[in-house]
Image (cartoon, grey):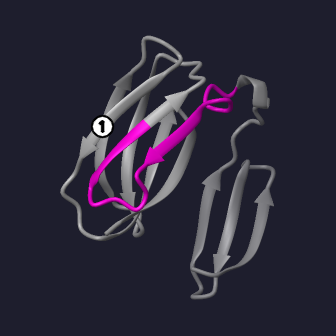
Amino acid sequence: VIISELEIHKATNKLYAATFGRGIWKVDLYEPTLIKDVPLYNAQLDFFPNPTKGEFEIELNNLELKEANVKIIDITGRTIFSEQLQFSSNYFKKSFDLKIMPGMYYAVLSNGKHSKSLKFVVQ
């Protein structure tokens, strides 16, 4: 969707977005966070192979947290797969074998309101 205008309403701490089709969206603005306080900032998220046939590995390095959620999201924003992950060290690796249709997807690692994502293709 094309966004034709963005406005911040400071009194309500909201961001408003106007779309080309006369739609208006609003979202809460969060308090600014210092980069050093973001637990996923230094985390390295790797995904291979890419492109894949549905069998892939996710590898995480430099983790500064004990748990996170991994989601596989299609290009329409629909969650195809979700799993809560637990970490015992700053390195984590897991294999997945998902039976999903060919197309473009996103692997999203999130912890609270912070996330990292990677785009991948299923053939």
Image quadrant in which the C terminus is located: bottom left
Dividing the picture into quadrants, the one containing residue 99 is bottom left
- In magenta stretch: residue 113: no
**Chain part drawn in magenta:** 38-58
Within-10-Å neighbours for mark 1: few <14, some 14–19, many 20+: few
Residue at the top extreme?
88
Q: Is residue 121 above or below residue 21?
A: above
Q: Going by the picture, which residue comes out furthest to the bottom?
A: 21
Residue 106, given in percent of the width and then of the height, sits at 45, 56
What residue is drawn where x is 48% and y is 12%?
89
Q: What residue did someone put label 1 on?
A: 95
User: Looking at the picture, how far across and down is residue 70, in whole percent?
Assistant: 39, 39
**Would residue 61 be found to the left or right of residue 3 on screen?**
left
Vertical comparison of 112 with 119: above or below? above
In x, y percent, where is residue 37?
A: 72, 23
Looking at the picture, tell me which residue is in the foreground, 102 or 30.
102
10 horizontally vs 113: left or right: right
Amino acid at dot 1? Ser
Please state which of residues 101 and 50 is positioned toward the viewer in this rendering: 50
Q: Secondary structure at mark 1?
A: strand
Q: Is residue 39 magenta?
A: yes
Residue 110 is situated, as x and y percent measured from the top left of the image, at 49, 37
> Residue visible at 30% across and 37% down?
95
Q: Residue at x 40, y 62 (%)?
A: 51
Residue 123 versus residue 42 in the image, above or below: below
The structure residue drawn at horizontal position 44% and vertical position 24%, both measured from the top left corner, is 92
Q: Count of labels shown? A: 1
In this image, 34 relative to 118: left or right? right
Question: In which quadrant of the rendered view does residue 33 lie?
Answer: top right
Q: Quadrant of the N terminus?
A: bottom right
Residue that lies at the very extreme toward the left in this rendered image: 99
